[in-house]
Amino acid sequence: MTRYFLNLIFRTSLIVLLTASFSIAPVLDAIAATPAKKLFGAKRLPVVMSPASYGFYSKGCLAGGIAMPHDGATWEVMRPSRNRRWGHPNLVRLIERLSIDAKKNYGWNGLMVGDLSQPRGGPMLTGHASHQVGLDADIWLRPMPARRWTRKERNSLSAISVLKKGTVRVNNGIWTKAHEGLIKTAAQYREVQRIFVHPGIKKKLCNTVKGDRRWLNKVRPYWGHHYHMHVRLRCQPGSTNCKRQASTGSGTGCDKTLEWWFKVAFAPKKNTKKKKTVVKKKKKKKKKVRRYKIMADLPSQCRTVLAGPNPVSIASVTLKPRGSIDTLVASNKAIVSTGAAAIAASAAVSPAINAVNSVVAVKQNVKDFTIPTPKPSR
Ligand SMILES: [Zn+2]
């Protein structure tokens, strides 16, 4: 009798196993066909694995990422609702170091930290082409005001361009030596591979930086990047499957390659007959259907990263800041809501920034600004 039952149990479990394996197959197919940005965009927590970047900045994922705390003594994370404050532990630590060094050496009053990566890196549903392997970070070119922004403000506050409106040149009413100091501090870190800024900013640096100019080599001109700089780290130790980016070579880059931006890229478009025919020809061409990256396009390890276990808590995977911010948070609670006067009183670096802060404070429901998509391969 017992043997009969054992036999029955064995048979039933075999049937269950077989049916399960048949029903898993379509699920796997569905994952394989889903755009990778949907899969990675849905992850709210990092994977518990040794920290490693897999693939390239614009085609990869991140294992063992940690979060930048929303608040530190010398930084605040912007756009918190996006949940893009995750990076390789070395990136997160470097941002903390940058916030301390820039304040100590150049009086930059704390960092406004923009996007890093998603918890497990990977392609994003909106915005950046890169930021996929936990080694890219956007830092706003605007110092933290004395008062902390509320969570709501951080999601809606407009970023400020350092360019003169309608031009590709830096606005000298906004630009300060501290801006230069912030970029210099980041560029001089050994771990930093390159920094993207708008060509107008690079030009400003080329024209004004005195003394040691070697660090200008890492500062690369690119579209957008006039309200933030994009700091990119090299592949970090332990990331054997991280694909390196080409070296920035030697020289300051204050040369013909920079002039190209102003002479060609930003030159006004000429309306000639020749151009019109080109446009017509282009229209005839079939529209290319954009194919989104699927899992098969990413390094194979990204499947493990996607399917791996969550941490026990967010706190366990969040940077433990060097300095305490308890006193700071307490002092902020004392400041009442979003008065324009309070913001104007917060000693910002230049009068121009104070003026803009006041405007932002009274403007309700500020729309989210559009992020220019940074191309990764420059
Ligand atoms: Zn960026």
Image: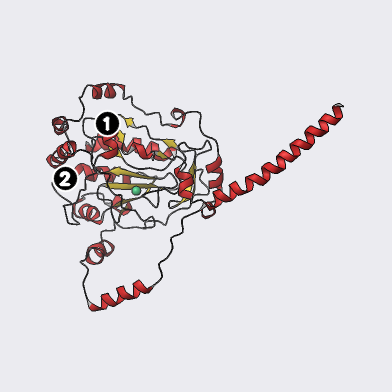
Relative to 96, is 131 above or below? below
Instruction: Tell which of 34 and 147 is nearer to you.
Output: 34
Residue occupied by mark 2 = 174
Which x, y percent locates residue 315? 44, 28
Q: Is residue 11 left or right of residue 285?
A: right
Q: Is residue 84 above or below residue 263?
A: above
* Residue 115 or residue 324, whichever sits in front: 115
What residue is at 48 percent from the left and 37 percent from the top?
Answer: 46
Instruction: For marks 2 and 1, give the CA distance.
Output: 24 Å
Label 2 vs label 1, nearer the camera: 1
Locate residue 376, reporting x and y percent. 38, 55
Which picture quadrant has residue 314?
A: top left
Q: Which residue is mark 1?
A: 150
The amino acid type of the residue labelled 1 equals Thr
Residue 149 sits in which quadrant? top left
Is any atom of residue 53 visible in this view?
A: yes
- Quadrant of image for the C terminus: bottom left
Instruction: Tell me the amino acid under the disc marked 2.
Output: Ile
